[in-house]
Amino acid sequence: PAKSPTIFGLPLKYVSLVTLAVQNASLSVVMHYSRVSTPAHLSYSPAAAVLLGEILKGSISFVIALWRAYESELHMSSRKSLTASFRQVCSEIFSSDCWKLSIPALLYVVQNSLQFVAIGNLPVASFQVTYQMKILTTAAFSVILLRRKLTSTKWLSLFFLAIGVGIVQVQTSSSNAGPKDFRVGSAHDAAPLHVHIMSPLKGFCAVTAACFTSGLAGVYFEMVLKNSKADLWVRNVQLSLFSLVPALLPVIYASPFPTSDGIISDLFRHFGGWAWATVSIQVFGGLVTAIVIKYSDNILKGFATSISIILSFLASVVLFDFHVTPSFLIGASTVLAATAMYNQPAPKEPTILASGSKN
Ligand code: C5P
């Protein structure tokens, strides 16, 4: 991993991992609420949310890349020209190897769209636990693409992870046999807001597919990032630019003929505060994820997100009247234990210790 800079005197590597855990937990809670708190016909378009997210992420990354280029120019020479930095960043973005980002871009758009299907059809806590299967896919793709070697302890912990996820999955599926009425609001509310139909099978299929795209896209992005000198933020702009194509397709497909209100108002119909909150948290998460992949790796990212299980679990008990069952607890604990086991540092080699090298 690249040498981690500090932020407020703390290593950016750890600050970004903790931030990602909190971001993950809040995203699943806010996204879930944004999908289930209104009936389907009054709900916002996930395709619009994905598209808006990519536009925002790309723009923010572009501003950061531009600022960094301008700063380094200030250091290099006394000349300071924003136009020159702008030209430099643009030429980096449209470099000959920019096509490499098209693959993770497509995968991430598919993943971000699947996430909406999953979260609207599963209780938050079950979604979070099942989504941990991405540690398994990430490990598999790390071994295949990055030629990373895994110890037997790590393989064993992946096996426990799969069992833990399986326990949660079985209990959620059986307790939600068939589409289920989901009442938003706490048990103490006299009048729940409305009834939302959830289909756990659909949710599990979506979350499983999202785990595959997550593993492949994350490892591919890490490979592109670590095998070249290009700036992280330039790579992010390239990622967002390539995402625009797959993100636009469902939008055009859904409404090929705009009404008299215009394309933009058609697209953002019912796009209320919760939808904006979902997009903002997702954009923030995308930026933090990029930092985590650069300064640590995808496997540590998995650890951070499994901490978020506990946070979103506590939140859903309070907010969505989530009922804790013994099998949920056993499954979730197995997932957490497996994650801790996976992240056990490998015993240090005596030669490394003797040379006094720091981590
Ligand atoms: O679940 P996972 O960690 O794979 O999710 C990654 C998320 O981060 C996706 O929503 C993806 O769009 C976003 N991302 C990003 N920029 C990157 C890497 C990931 O926006 N460079």
Image (cartoon, helix red, strand yellow):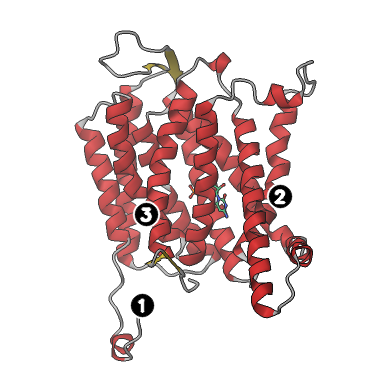
Q: CA distance from mark 3 to mark 1?
A: 20 Å
Residue occupied by mark 2:
241
Between marks 2 and 3, how big is the CA–CA gap?
28 Å
73 above or below 303? below
Q: What residue lies at 22% left-to-right and 38% top-to-bottom?
A: 329
Q: Residues within 10 Å of mark 1 (few under 14, many from 20)?
A: few
Is 47 rendered above or below residue 283?
A: above
SS type, badge 1:
loop
Asked if labels 1 and 3 touch by Cβ distance under 8 angstroms, the answer is: no
Residue 114 relative to residue 157: left or right: right
Q: Residue at x 57, y 14 (%)?
A: 41
The residue mark sitting in front, 3 or 1, is: 3
Secondary-structure class at tag 2: helix
Marker disc for residue 359: 1
Residue type for callout 1 = Asn
Residue 166: x and y in percent read 33, 40
At label 2, the amino acid type is Leu
Q: Which residue is mark 3?
A: 18
Q: x and y percent of residue 55 in the render?
A: 66, 43
In the image, 156: left or right of 144?
Answer: left
Residue at the extreme left: 326
